[in-house]
Every structure is written in structure tokens, then in C-alpha cells.
Amino acid sequence: MWMNDPNGLIHYAGTWHLFYQSNPSDDRWGNMSWGHASSTDLVSWQFHPTAIAAESGEDIFSGSCVAVPAEIVAAWPHPVETGAASEVLVAVYTSHWHSDSPRAGTQSQSLATSADGGHTWVRYPGNPVLDRGSSDFRDPTVVRYTGPGGPYWVLVAVEAVDQQVLFYRSDDLLTWTFLSAFG
């Protein structure tokens, strides 16, 4: 197995979850998916099955993970199973679209949800949630802003070729409004 960039380190229900870029079927880059490991002490790690696997037409690139109140996810327009969980983990990641996809050659931001603490993941049926039509729009980090005018979610991502850091905001993780750029 090949592994690379850590993604979505999150402490949830007493356990640290680390997601990372992975090729679960080879020892070199390709078939990009999210691997998963967990720890209660940040020293000893248990590896788990692939969290979000590459599919035909889509590789899973870098991103982040946040805990979201279940009522927010339950209000999304496409059905998302939340079970009895009061919070749902949401992975925000870059979809890298292959030549056999209608979005071929572009990168956009997508979501997956986990109602069982990060062990099983379901892609959001309305993906992607943020698409600039760009070939180099990637590496989203999402945080919850709770200061003046908040609360809302902030997404920070890059336009790599343009050497720009882009800032967006959202109330529901689905609809994103551009705030500013730096670079």
C-alpha cells in the first residue's frame, strides 16, 4: 500500500482519527483513496479498511474532516443517513475527475458522511458542492467560525497554478460563498 498526505485529523468520541491519501492496491501513486487509522493516545495506531475509495472517474485527493450536528446533515436536499447519531462526521475532499468523467481534467470539492464515527463513509449524492471548473483547485480545510457574524463554516483551498489561497463560507457545507483570495 502507498500512503501520503495526512487528511482530516479529528478527535471524536475519545478517539483520534487520521485519514490520509492512499493507494490501497499498489505501492505507488495512483487509485487515490482515503486510508484510515485511529488512536486513543496519538502513539499507537490501528489501521482500518479504506475510508473513501477511488471510483471510476474520480480520485479522492486531500481534504479535512469536521463533526457536524446531525440536524444540519438531515436537512440537506439529498437523503443522508444519520441513524441515531447526534453528530455526523463530514469529510470535505478534493475530487480529481478522470477522462471518463463529465468533469474530466478538473478538481472540485466534495463531501462524504459517516454516522458511525468514521468507520464507514457515504459520498454525498449532490457532489461536487464547490466547483470552479479548474484543473488545480484543491486541498480544502474546513473550520467552524464562531466569532462576530458567525457561526458559519469557512473553507480554505488553493488554486495551485495561480498560487492563490481562496476563502469561502457556508451555513450548511453545501452552498459556498466566495469571501476573498490571498496570493
Image (spheres, rainbow, N blue to C red):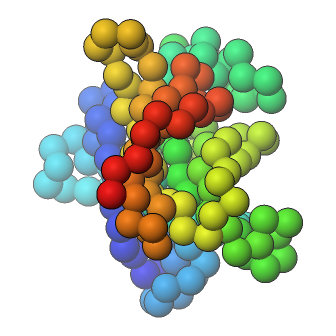
Depth order, front residue of 144/69 = 144
Depth order, front residue of 154/36 = 154
Q: What residue is at 43 percent from the left and 40 percent from the top?
A: 180
Q: What residue is at 29 percent from the left and 35 percent from the top?
A: 11
Vertical placement of residue 167 versus 18, above or below? above
Q: Is residue 17 left or right of residue 23?
A: left
Residue 63 in sight in this render: yes
On the image, the x and y values in percent for residue 160 come to 44, 68
On the rendered image, what quadrant is the C terminus found in? bottom left
On the image, the x and y values in percent for residue 70 come to 57, 17
Vertical placement of residue 104 versus 20, above or below? below
Q: What residue is at 28 percent from the left and 42 percent from the top?
A: 16
On the image, the x and y values in percent for residue 168 come to 49, 36
Q: What residue is at 37 percent from the left and 32 percent from the top?
A: 143
Q: Is residue 66 left or right of residue 120?
A: left
Depth order, front residue of 176/21 = 176
